Image (tube, helix red, strand yellow):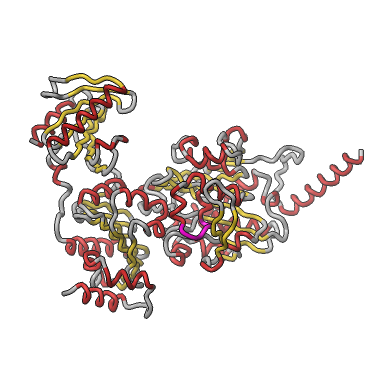
C-alpha cells in the first residue's frame, strides 16, 4: 500500500471536517508515513478520531506544549503526532513522539519517569496511572491520556496495538543489559544526549544509579565513536580534574585508571574500555566493583 | 483639627463599607497597614472530592479575608479579569490547571463586592475548548456568574510594553479594557524554568508566537508582570505539580500542600510559591529579576505574611 493511499484512507477514516487547514493538508500529503501507519484505521478499541491527526515539529511544538517542548527538542524530536478521539465513553488524547533514534526516545522517556511509578510491560518499558499510560519502543515515545469511564482499559488496548504496529525493538537500549545488575537501582537509568554534568566531552552518555548499603554511586558511560575518541575524552576529563581539583593514577582500579575529586563533581574513579569512558561518581566502599564489573562486561 | 475630622469621617465610611461587605474581622485595626501577603493552610488533607472543594473555597475566602477582604481590591462597578491557568487538557486532580473552586470563589467574592462584570479566560497551549471543559473551570466559573469564554484570535492587539525583552507584543484586547486583574496561578514544576508561578501565568494574556518568549523567558515574564501589574495574586497550592510540568498528567507527580496564598506583591508571592516546590526563591530567574527591577521583594518573610491555619 502506497503512502498516498494510506494518507487518503487516514483522511477518509478520520473523516471529519470537509476542509483541513493548509498546514494539516500539507502534512498529510508530504510526510510522516511511519507515524500515520501507527494510527491507520481501524483505530484501537474501536476509537473514532475527532479530526485528522495534527503534526508538530521542533519549531512548532511550543504551540502545543509551551515550555514543555524544550526538553523534547533537546533530545532531538523529529515529529509529534497528536490525535484526539473517543472510544465509547472514554475521551482520548494520543501523542506519539518520533524521537529519531532509540537512544533519544529512551532518554526522553527516562527523563520523565520516576523509579516509584507503576511500571507495565508495554513496548520496551512503560508506566501507567489513572488516565495515563506512557511507553517507549524503538525510536517512539508514546504518551496516552484518557478521560471518563473505562478510559484505562482503552489505553492498554491502544498501547498493545501501537506496540504491535511499531513492531521492532521491544527492549531497552542494549548497553544497559551489559552493565552490572547487582546493586542497580531499578528504573534509574537515564540517557543524556548532550553535556552530562555540564561537560560536552562526556556526551552522549548513559547514567545508572547503584545503591551500596545506604550510599549511592552513579555510573556514567560515555559513548565514544571509537577507542581513540574515548581516549581523547578521557584526557579531557583528566585535564578538567587536574585544573579544578586533584587527579592521580589508580592502578588498583586498572591500567591507566584515575581517582579524582573536585568541589563540582565530588569524587570519581574513571577509565576507558574500548569506545566507552566509564566514570563512577561518588565511589564508596564496595562500589568500585561496579566499575570493574562494567569493564569486564563491556570488553 | 480639620485634617483629623476628615480622617475620622473617612474611617467611618470605611467601617460602614466593610461591615456591609461582611469582610471586616472584629480584630482588624483600620489604622494599621494592610498586609501584603497571606497564607491560608488546611491542617487536614481531605480525600473526598466534595471535601477538597470545600477546602479550596474556605482557603480562598480566608486568604482574601486576611488581606482585608475583597472590598480592599474590588469596587462597585469594576470590570474584573480573573486569570487562572486553563492551559492544559487536564482534570483538576492532575494539578496542571488552577483549582476550579478557587476560581469560582473568587468570582463570587468579586460579585459580592459589586463588580459589574467578572471575566474568566486564558490563552491555553492545548486545544482551548477541551482545556476549558476538562479543567472544570468553565463550568465552575459560569455557575458563579462569570463571563467565561475561549479567546477570539482576532482580538489580540499589538501593545507597547517597552520591556527589556518585549518592546511590544500582542495582548488580548479585553484584558486591556478592565479595571482590575486578579492573577490566579497554580504552583507547578516547569521543565524549562524550574517553576511556573504567578508571573509565568501572565503568558496567558499574550498571543502571537509565544515560543519566542523562551529566547529570554526571564525578562519576558518580568516585562509582562511590570505591564499588567495585577491588583491581586491568589496562588492555588491546594495541589501542586512536583514533576514533569507544565503539562503533567501523572497523578504520582501531584502532591497536596492544602494552601492558598494571596498577595499584592507579585514577586513575593512567587518567591513563596517556589518554596512549595522545595526551591529557593533565588533559583527562579524571573523572581530574581522581578526583585532586581523593584517590582516586589524576593524576601517574602519581610512582608510578615498573615498565616491562617484552618
Tell me which residue sits at (46%, 48%) in the image. B239
Visible residue check, residue B61: no
> How far across and down, in percent of the image, does residue B261 sit?
56, 44
Residue A71 in the figure: left or right of residue B44: left
Q: Nearer the viewer, residue A66 or B260?
A: A66
Tell me which residue sits at (38%, 59%) in the image. A60
Question: Which quarter of the rendering shows the N terminus of chain B?
Answer: top right
Visible residue check, residue A264: yes
Q: Nearer the viewer, residue B57 or A251?
A: A251
> How far across and down, in percent of the image, does residue A199 sit?
29, 35
Tell me which residue sits at (28%, 60%) in the image. A96
Looking at this view, name the residue that lies furthest to the right.
Answer: B1
Where residue A217 sits, quadrant-wise, is: top left
Residue A16 in the figure: left or right of residue A284: right
Residue A142 in the figure: left or right of residue B78: left
* Residue bounds of the magenta highlight: B204-209
Q: Nearer the viewer, residue A192 or A149?
A: A192
Amino acid at each position: 500500500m502506497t503512502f498516498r493511499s494510506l494518507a487518503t484512507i487516514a483522511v477518509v477514516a478520520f473523516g471529519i471536517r470537509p476542509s483541513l487547514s493548509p498546514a494539516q493538508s500539507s502534512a498529510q500529503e508530504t510526510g510522516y508515513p511511519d507515524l500515520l501507519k501507527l494510527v491507520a484505521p481501524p483505530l484501537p478499541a474501536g476509537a473514532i478520531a475527532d479530526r485528522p491527526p495534527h503534526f508538530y515539529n521542533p519549531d512548532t511544538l511550543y504551540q502545543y506544549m509551551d515550555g514543555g517542548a524544550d526538553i523534547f527538542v533537546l533530545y532531538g524530536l523529529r515529529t509529534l503526532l497528536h490525535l484526539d478521539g473517543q472510544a465509547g465513553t472514554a475521551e482520548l488524547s494520543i501523542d506519539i513522539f518520533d524521537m529519531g533514534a532509540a537512544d533519544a526516545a529512551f532518554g526522553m522517556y527516562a527523563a520523565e519517569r520516576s523509579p516509584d511509578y507503576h511500571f507495565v510491560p508495554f513496548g520496551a518499558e512503560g508506566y501507567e496511572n489513572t488516565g495515563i499510560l506512557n511507553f517507549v519502543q524503538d525510536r517512539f515515545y508514546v504518551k496516552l491520556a484518557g478521560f471518563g469511564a473505562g478510559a484505562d482499559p482503552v489505553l492498554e488496548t491502544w498501547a498493545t496495538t501501537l506496540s504491535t504496529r511499531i513492531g521492532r525493538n521491544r527492549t531497552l537500549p542494549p548497553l544497559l543489559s551489559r552493565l552490572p545488575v547487582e546493586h542497580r537501582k531499578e528504573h534509574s537509568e537515564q540517557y543524556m544526549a548532550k553535556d552530562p554534568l555540564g561537560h560536552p566531552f562526556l556526551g552522549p552518555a548513559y547514567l545508572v544509579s547503584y545503591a551500596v548499603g545506604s550510599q549511592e554511586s552513579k555510573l556514567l558511560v560515555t559513548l565514544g565513536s571509537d577507542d581513540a575518541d574515548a581516549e581523547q575524552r578521557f584526557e579531557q576529563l583528566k585535564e578538567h580534574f587536574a585544573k579544578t581539583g586533584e587527579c592521580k593514577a589508580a592502578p588498583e582500579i586498572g591500567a591507566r585508571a584515575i581517582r579524582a575529586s573536585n568541589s563540582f563533581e565530588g569524587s570519581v574513579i574513571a577509565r576507558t574500555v574500548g569506545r566507552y569512558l566509564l566514570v563512577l561518581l561518588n565511589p564508596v566502599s564496595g562500589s568500585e566493583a561496579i566499575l570493574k564489573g562494567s569493564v569486564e562486561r563491556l570488553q | 483639627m480639620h485634617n483629623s475630622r476628615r480622617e475620622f469621617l473617612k474611617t467611618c465610611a470605611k467601617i460602614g463599607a466593610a461591615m456591609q461587605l461582611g469582610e471586616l474581622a472584629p480584630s482588624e485595626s483600620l489604622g494599621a497597614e494592610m498586609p501584603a501577603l497571606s497564607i491560608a493552610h488546611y491542617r487536614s488533607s481531605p480525600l473526598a472530592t466534595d471535601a477538597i472543594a470545600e477546602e479550596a473555597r474556605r482557603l480562598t475566602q480566608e486568604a482574601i479575608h486576611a488581606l482585608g477582604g475583597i472590598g480592599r481590591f474590588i469596587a462597585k462597578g469594576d470590570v474584573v479579569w480573573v486569570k487562572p491557568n486553563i492551559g492544559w487538557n487536564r482534570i483538576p486532580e492532575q494539578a496542571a490547571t488552577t483549582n476550579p473552586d478557587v476560581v469560582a470563589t473568587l468570582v463570587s467574592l468579586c460579585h459580592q463586592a459589586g463588580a459589574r462584570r467578572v471575566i474568566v479566560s486564558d490563552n491555553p497551549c492545548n486545544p482551548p475548548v477541551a482545556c476549558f471543559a476538562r479543567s472544570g473551570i468553565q463550568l465552575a466559573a459560569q455557575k458563579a456568574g462569570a463571563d467565561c469564554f475561549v479567546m477570539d484570535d482576532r482580538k489580540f492587539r499589538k501593545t507597547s510594553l517597552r520591556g527589556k525583552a518585549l518592546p511590544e507584543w500582542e495582548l488580548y484586547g479585553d484584558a486591556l479594557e478592565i479595571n482590575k486583574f486578579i492573577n490566579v496561578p497554580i504552583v507547578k514544576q516547569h521543565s524549562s524554568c524550574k517553576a511556573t508561578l504567578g508571573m509565568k501565568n501572565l503568558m496567558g494574556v499574550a498571543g502571537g508566537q509565544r515560543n519566542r518568549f523562551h529566547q529570554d523567558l526571564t525578562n519576558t515574564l518580568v516585562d509582562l508582570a511590570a505591564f499588567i501589574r495585577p491588583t491581586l495574586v491568589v496562588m492555588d497550592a491546594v495541589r501542586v505539580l512536583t514533576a514533569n510540568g507544565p503539562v503533567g498528567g501523572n497523578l504520582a507527580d501531584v502532591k497536596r500542600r492544602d494552601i492558598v496564598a494571596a498577595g499584592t506583591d507579585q514577586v513575593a508571592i512567587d518567591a513563596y510559591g517556589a518554596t512549595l516546590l522545595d526551591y529557593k526563591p533565588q533559583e527562579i530567574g524571573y523572581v530574581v529579576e522581578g526583585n532586581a527591577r523593584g517590582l516586589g521583594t524576593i524576601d517574602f518573610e519581610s512582608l510578615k505574611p498573615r498565616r491562617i491555619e484552618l
